[in-house]
Amino acid sequence: QVLLYPAGEPSDKLTYQASLQLPSGWKYGTALPVQGESAGSIRFAPASLTMLVDSPVLAGMNFRRVDLAPGATPHQYLDMASDSKIGLAMPDDQVTKYRQLMAEAYALFGARHFREYHFLLSLSDHVAHFGLEHHESSDDRSWERMWLDEDKRIAASNLLAHELAHSWNGKYRRPAGLATPNYQEPMKGDLLWVYEGLTQYIGFVLANRSGVRTPQQTRDALALAAAELDNRPGRTWRPLLDTAVEAQLLYDAPPEWASWRRGTDFYNEGLLLWLEADVTIRQLTRGKHSLDDFCKEFHGGPGGPPKVVPYSFEDLVSTLNGIAPHDWRGFFEARLHSLSPRAPLGGIEHGGWRVAYTDSMSPYMKSIAKARENIDLRFSLGLLVADGKEGQGLIQDVIPGSPAAKAGVAPGVTLVAVNGRRWSKEELLDAVRATKGGEPLELLVDNGEFYRTSKLQYRGGQRYPYSRHMRRR
């Protein structure tokens, strides 16, 4: 993407009027106000450069708009473009749940900071899948059959909730280091554990409250996120804060060596931090207050058109202290700078749960594995193996110190055989299961023109995380 504009000028002070010509028969969605249109030519109203850059357009031949707040003001839409007409077949029960998502967001924050809101959802297997937040919209991309394939729908169940939450947390209230006046000044990401971590937590909450996720799916998603972080040796040298500071580099890092290098962990470790903050508030106030009160105080205020209200770490601490007096500075700093090999699981454990392991995947984890086309053995052998059409058998990551790592298996090699037989998903899983009965496990891997056989010293069988409720004695 290239943007040319007068150097050094604040983007809020520059005004442009955009136009767009679409192919015949195409429809579009955008939050950018339209002044007029005819014969496929669209004239947008004059807008600041900030608003223009922040307002993408989704267009396509196969297009559908779903009203997520019928009769309400401001308007809130789910705009979808798909590679096929059938991909637009969003079931009625899902429409109901996403309408409730919008209602739950308003109930949480108490105000809206947009004139309209548009989810711009691309449904295609030929684009990268991600979400990108904007103030009055979000650029959301998922599988073509997201609405038709239950596994894909479950795997994408946090996407829209997360991006919607960004309209308040990230776009309206924004860390001062990210609230730059133009597109030349470098951003500072030291508060990304709030920008993304708190948004991740709010997304989990909103998806659960609206029914987009069931309570069990929410607990399973939380257990998986916590277990991933609790089995990440890289946390012994790289603290959470450094993953935020280094975000520009980590966003594009490959999956190989992620467990040692760490990635954008400020999302899910931020989720754990804010869960613990929520539980702490509830305990300190004997249930009278929660993080809901913080969200309403910090992100609410008078609603209206988009604007940015920057904040600092001090502002966070001050607002939290107004709700539940506590050493919030020490609370966050200890966790941001920690080099403990253990993830911050206080929110889960003080909430009456713990991350435990069993020999079968939760339904949620099965859906994730199917949709992402991988075999997740990180919690047993220490392996993550690709299982898609492309890169099948590729070892995507190996956890340092795990049985696989100790046997010499490394990320980037390709699995060829399991116990002398050509590898398959079933063959690999059966072999791992058999280790519990003392059966050997031997992997043959291909590293370019070289082959290597690795004998794994492991007797634990299959092992997957789940949330176990702790009964009071």
Image (cartoon, rainbow, N blue to C red):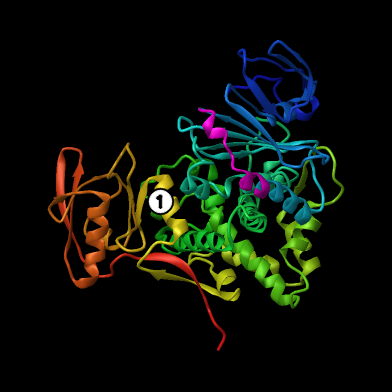
Is residue 338 on the magenta stretch?
Answer: no
Residue 39 in the figure: left or right of residue 433 = right
Which residue reaches farthest bottom? 473
Of 422 and 39, which appears nearest the observer? 39
Q: Which residues are magenta?
A: 84-97
Looking at the rendered structure, the secondary structure element under dot 1 is helix
**In this view, 123 is above or below 453:** above
| Residue under pointer 1 | 369
Of 22 and 279, which appears nearest the observer? 22
Of 200 and 331, which appears nearest the observer? 200
Which residue reaches farthest top? 39
**Residue at position x 73%, y 31% in the image:** 31
Q: Quadrant of residue 46?
A: top right
Q: Amino acid at mark 1?
A: Ala
Question: Which image quarter is the N terminus in?
Answer: top right
Q: Residues within 10 Å of mark 1 (few under 14, many from 20)?
A: some
Question: Which image quarter is the C terminus in?
Answer: bottom right
Residue 19 in the figure: left or right of residue 405 = right
Is residue 95 on the magenta stretch?
Answer: yes
Q: Quadrant of residue 183?
A: top right
Asked whether residue 406 is in view, the answer is no
**In this view, 129 is above or below 49:** below
Residue 358 rendering spot, x and y as whole percentages: 38, 69
Residue 157 rendering spot, x and y as whole percentages: 56, 49
